[in-house]
Amino acid sequence: MGNNTHGHINDLLYTDTYYEDLRGSTSFKLGGGNDPNLVQYPAVNGGYLYAFDSGDELGLQFQLQHAWKIGTDLDLHLHWTPRGNGVAENGNTVNWRVDLSAAGIGQAFPAVTTYVLTDTCPGTDDEHLIIDATVAVPGSALTLSSVLVGRVYRLAGDTWAGLGGGGAPLLLEVDFHIQKDRPGSRQEYVK
């Protein structure tokens, strides 16, 4: 078939839209004032996750992939677990929040937007739970390699009873479902 430098054949191959997770940096940034507890999970020979008391927060950073379908919204998600406290916290709520600001290369970062991600514990120990934001992050002003910065935190006023490393809910991940229309961009900063 030969090498097609004009991309016409490639354009025909990528007519559908696909979904992918956009994940942030692998290390969250601690602010120092309201840091969550770092606890081992699972409790024996597990990795380490952050347990969030009311008011705890972590900084976040994301960069849009080159495969992102330009102009489409980003669907914000938060993954968490009650760990071994699911039965004890049955019916209790957790008030998660995510503040975000996004800018493309050469753009100024606007004021943050707060996304509300409240969830109710269904009463199962160690369950992997996911919360969708009620409003997607608008993609109309974003460009390839746009960066999103902000924080994830637990707001006071929920009904979760457990505290600290032994009782607070654990954050698994904050991520986005994004639409993709090809495996990447043809040029470094141009689709």
Image: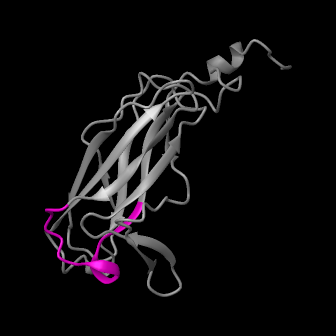
Residue 38, quarter of the rendered image: bottom left
Q: Is residue 118 above or below residue 107?
A: below
Q: How many tags in the picture?
A: 0
Closer to the camera in the image, 118 or 152: 152
Q: Is residue 150 above or below residue 84?
A: above
Query: Which quadrant does the N terminus fall into?
Result: top right
In the displayed image of the protein, which residue is found farthest to the right? Answer: 2
Residue 106 percent coordinates (x, y) = 56, 24
Closer to the camera in the image, 90 or 175: 175
In the displayed image of the protein, which residue is found farthest to the bottom? Answer: 44
Query: Which quadrant does the C terminus fall into?
Result: top right
Please state the extent of the stretch shown in magenta in the rendering.
156-172
Which residue is rendered at x = 26% and y = 63% of the image? 55
Judged left or right of residue 54, residue 24 is: right
Residue 129 percent coordinates (x, y) = 32, 62
Magenta-drawn stretch contains 168: yes
Residue 87 percent coordinates (x, y) = 21, 79
Judged left or right of residue 67, residue 170 is: left
Q: Is residue 21 above or below residue 183?
A: below
Judged left or right of residue 151, residue 168 is: left
Residue 184 percent coordinates (x, y) = 65, 31
Which residue is rendered at x = 45% and y = 51% of the image? 60
Magenta-drawn stretch contains 50: no
Residue 56, quarter of the rendered image: bottom left
